[in-house]
Image: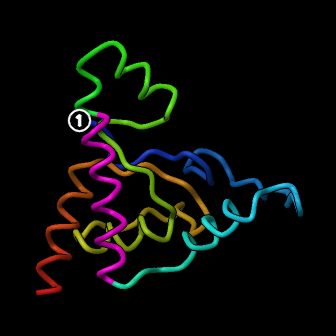
Amino acid sequence: MSKPILKIIEGPSPTKEGISQASTAGMTSVLSAASKAADLFAHDTEGLVQILHFRNQIAKAAHRRSSWFGGRIYNKFSGEEADYIPVSGTHLRQTLSAVGIETPSFVIASGQYQLRLDISEEAVSLLKEMLT
């Protein structure tokens, strides 16, 4: 059985309705808020390639670490996975569009998802071809 193309970390799923999240004004750090805000906006092709390439490298490092016990523990506590990369709903839409996969209707811009590494690598390859 093959692995699913994406996993839902945060956001609505096809089996349940999304619940609006209460705002915690003043409780989140400025950097965290800025990072979340940046994920809501679509990037140009070059920016998307950079994001995906960076996250692909992190997943490949997690894969290398997974071959020994200490590495598996590190991956568990850091939340890094060898087969998936974390992406926002906006970047997920852009990436799936690049590889010709229709985005599921439940994907929202503010949602957090994990995209299978091979799909992300294919998107990077296709997007780089578009840039040249």
Which element is circle 1 on? loop
Q: How many marks?
A: 1
- Kind of residue indicated by mark 1: Ser
- Which residue is located at x 63 percent, y 65 percent? 36
Q: Is residue 127 left or right of residue 23?
A: left
Q: Nearer the viewer, residue 121 or 18?
A: 121
Residue 47 inside the magenta-drawn segment: yes
Q: Is residue 52 left or right of residue 107?
A: left
- Which residue is located at x 41 percent, y 70 percent? 93
Q: Nearer the viewer, residue 62 or 12?
A: 62
Give the dominant element type of the magenta stretch: helix, strand or loop: helix
- Which residue is located at x 27 percent, y 58 percent? 120
Q: Quadrant of residue 7?
A: top left
Quadrant showing the C terminus: bottom left
Residue 104 location (% of width, % of height) = 44, 62
Residue 55 location (% of width, % of height) = 35, 54
Q: Nearer the viewer, residue 51 or 127?
A: 51
Q: Vertically, is 7 above or below 109?
A: above
Q: Which residues are magenta?
A: 45-62
Q: Is residue 32 left or right of residue 92?
A: right
List the residue tagged with mark 1. Answer: 2
- Which residue is located at x 60 percent, y 65 percent? 35
Residue 121 location (% of width, % of height) = 20, 58
Q: Vertically, is 46 above or below 111?
A: below
Residue 90 inside the magenta-drawn segment: no
Q: Quadrant of residue 31?
A: bottom right
